[in-house]
Image (cartoon, grey):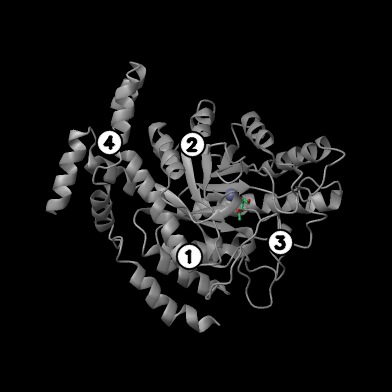
Amino acid sequence: MERYEDARAQYRAAGADTELAMEKLRHVPISLHCWQGDDVRGFDQDGPLTGGIQATGNYLGRARTPEELFQDLEKALSLMPGTKKLNVHASYAIFSPGEHADRDRIEPRHFAEWVAFAKKHGMGLDFNPTFFSHRRVKDGLTLSSPDEETRRFWVEHGRACIRIASYFAEETGIPCVMNIWTGDGFKDIPADRLGPRLRYRQSIDEILAEPYDFGKVKPCVESKVFGIGVESYTAGSGEFALLYAAENKHRCIPLMDNGHYHPTELVSDKIPALLSFFPEIALHVTRPVRWDSDHVVRFDDETREIAKEIVRCGGLDGRVDIALDFFDASINRIAAWTIGFRNTEKALLYALLQPAAELRELQEESRFTELLARQEELKTLPFGTVWECYCERCGAPADGEWFTEIRKYEKEVLSGRR
Ligand code: RNT
Ligand code: ZN
């Protein structure tokens, strides 16, 4: 492609190697969340989505069964370049007809179909215990509940999930990131902020007492600033989750979701802060619009900045586990997956095309005027041409090509789901 050779030369002149960038990115796994396909409903119960999170909208074609979800995922995967992992929630257990196991009793076999699907597509699997949308959530609390029976139930759920995560790692041969997030909190000003956190801490200790190999199962703790209905207090706050992980470095890693901070805080800046202390961290890449709204990831400034920090800090060599976390029910869900995933890949490719060493040198020599000029000029290099080439090499459709597939799928498959 002549156009690509031109672009390659322009990047070379700017100090970046497009071939190296594309080759690097191809092997970086990004974890695709199963829950965009069905508005976080899962298969193990019929109740509403709880935990302070919301999927809004009623676009046609929500996946209602495992078969539909697998079919939709397959379509979405075919439209994305790069290496994928699949992120599954415990609420997506698949029971045989007439069978049911409560969350404290789920077993690896209830996820055998997920393993088969992952193997079919050569993907690793990540996992999440589901501490929401369930009748055993008592007064909005799970792992931090003062009701011992409730707390124990959820600890048992967490332990069951460690066993399932081990099974995923064993079966796929790829480590499984297992993320602990609860929406535990209070709507109004609490009388005791310490008690729930001490119980939460004890509960995670008890979950992680389940034996696992930290080379294969990577438990994380995800923090949050607040959820809908629990605006005044969140047990798993930023400091709580970070300090838990810091104290348990040999068996747990911190997870940052970029929708879970105050609006002027930036996860891009937190990445190098955490990497100064942790060998490995995990991310939920999302797009918060004024709050934790879980909009589809765009190719926007902060997504690019997050990608730059991942790349510059050596995050692509196993130090940063990247997962997506958004759920928009107001647009075509397969397109939502595709757009968010492609944009994350795009941001990483864009970041890999920064002449990082040269820019760092300018900073270290305090040549800030030149740094500003260089940074600005990099923005208008022919990035689209390199992206197009990357998609082609990955066997994925280019921009402008994949949307016709969505339209066709909507007409032929989704519209039949009314
Ligand atoms: C919620 C957290 C959490 C969930 C998923 C479904 O605010 O971001 O990661 O989105 O577990
Ligand atoms: Zn998240």
Q: Earlier in the sequence, mark 4 or mark 1?
A: 1
In the rendered image, the vertical position of residue 373 relative to residue 258, given as above or below: above
- Name the residue rendered at 24%, 49% in the picture: 386
The kind of residue on which mark 2 rests is Ser
The kind of residue on which mark 1 rests is Ala
Q: Quick one: label 3, few (<14), some, or many (20+) residues within 10 Å? A: many
Residue 132 percent across, percent down from the top left: 71, 57
| Residue picked out by circle 3 | 133
Marks 3 and 2, Cα distance to the nearest angstrom? Answer: 31 Å
Q: Nearer the viewer, mark 4 or mark 1?
A: 4
Query: Is 397 left, or right, of 3 in this rendering?
Result: right
Q: Nearer the viewer, residue 70 or 54?
A: 54
Q: Earlier in the sequence, mark 3 or mark 4?
A: 3
Query: Is 414 left, or right, of 121 in this rendering?
Result: right
Say which quadrant the C terminus sits in. bottom right
Q: Are marks 3 and 2 in contact (CB under 8 Å)?
A: no
| Residue picked out by circle 1 | 116
- Name which quarter of the figure residue 381 lies in: top left
| Residue picked out by circle 2 | 268
